[in-house]
Image (cartoon, rainbow, N blue to C red):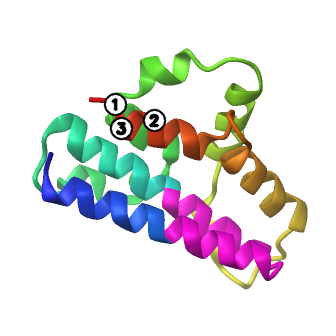
Amino acid sequence: MSAAANRWFDDACKLKEVGDFCALRNDWRGAYRSYGSSVEYMLKALYLRNTQQRSMPSHMRTAASHDLNFVAQQAGLGQALGNLKGAQLFNWLTVRDWDQGRRYPNQAFPVKEGKDFRLALLQPELGIWQWLLNEWHRT
């Protein structure tokens, strides 16, 4: 596994912890921003690992690379995502629709959106974070 993939994975885990801290403080915009970025970084770690890249290629450093569905497809997770069912599929659809533009403070941010994102990501057994970790640990 490439060192670059491991760095992206480590940063994804750190961003998830920042999201947890923000949620504890009821900073739902911060939680949304951090949790969404953690998913983006985890997907990019999987991309680097699955494609055996040593660094992030230019096509993965564009505005499209903030689109979680795009990054997931580039990481080769399309079939695995297609196998999601029920609540876990609903959770992916919630996480997939993360909008990195919502991180800016000049827009109103609904608390419910931050809480829904956190639930979809961290729901026990069916959350997308655990699913991503399982994908990461798969050989």
Asked if the magenta segment contains residue 32, the reply would be: yes
Q: Which mark is residue 138?
A: 1
Where is 69 relative to 13, above or below? above
Give amino acid for label 3. Answer: His
Q: Quadrant of the C terminus?
A: top left
Give amino acid for label 2. Answer: Asn
Q: Are marks 3 and 2 in contact (CB under 8 Å)?
A: yes
Q: Are marks 1 and 3 in contact (CB under 8 Å)?
A: yes
Q: Which mark is residue 6?
A: none
Q: 133 or 33, which lies in front?
A: 133
User: Is residue 66 something that shows in the picture?
Assistant: no
Query: Circle 2 sits on which residue?
Result: 134
Q: Residues within 10 Å of mark 3 (few under 14, many from 20)?
A: few
Q: Quadrant of residue 21?
A: bottom right
For residue 1, side relative to residue 73 (left or right) = left
Task: Measure how far apart labels 1 and 3 are at the Cα level.
Answer: 4 Å
Residue at 15 percent across and 45 percent down: it is: 1
Residue at 73 percent across and 56 percent down: it is: 118
Query: Circle 3 sits on which residue?
Result: 137
Q: Which residues are magenta?
A: 15-38
User: Is residue 74 something that shows in the picture?
Assistant: yes
Q: Quadrant of residue 26?
A: bottom right
Asked if the magenta segment contains residue 90, the reply would be: no
